[in-house]
Image (cartoon, helix red, strand yellow):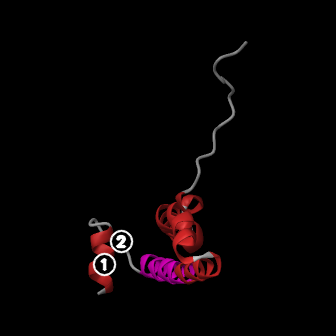
Amino acid sequence: MQLFNRSSEPTTAVSPENNKFGTFDGVFLPTLLTILGAVMYLRTGWVVGQAGLLSGLLIIVIANVITTCTGLSISSIATNIRVGAGGSFSIISQSL
């Protein structure tokens, strides 16, 4: 059993261009999943129990529309601005 690969084949380095995430994979999807996971699905049973089935579904649909619009605007801002050393503070200060 060989533990180490001692072949003489050169390894190819991955270029930085291939590691970049796009707007959807890098910004929109993580933001949307964070908002929906923490806020929406933990409280869905309580909302339906308090408002009823049809009203609860209407509230959930409206909340999903608002969350989607928020995720799209965040991804638009984050992909059109060069992020500096401040991270999210840099994004907010440049967009305001």
Q: Is residue 50 above or below residue 2?
A: below
Residue 12's label in the rendered image is none
Nearer the observer, 69 or 93: 69
- Residue at point 65% right, 37% down? 10
Check the picture and name the quadrant holding the N terminus. top right
Foreground tag (2 vs 1): 1
Magenta stretch, main secondary structure, is: helix
Determine whether label 2 and label 1 are within 8 Å by CB.
Answer: no
Can residue 55 be spotted in the picture? yes
Nearer the observer, 63 or 95: 63
- Where is residue 68 shown, x and y percent of the image? 55, 79
Residue 70 magenta-drawn? yes
Residue 92's label in the rendered image is 1
Check the picture and name the quadrant holding the C terminus. bottom left
Which residue position holds label 2? 83
Nearer the observer, 47 or 17: 47
Q: Residues within 10 Å of mark 1 (few under 14, many from 20)?
A: some
Nearer the observer, 15 or 80: 80
- Of label 2 and label 1, which has the lower sequence position? 2
Q: Which amino acid does label 1 sit on?
A: Ile
| Element under disc 2 | loop
Question: Label 2 to label 1, Cα distance in Å?
Answer: 10 Å
Can residue 26 be spotted in the picture? no
- Residue at point 48% right, 68% down? 35
- Where is residue 37 shown, x and y percent of the image? 52, 62
| Element under disc 1 | helix
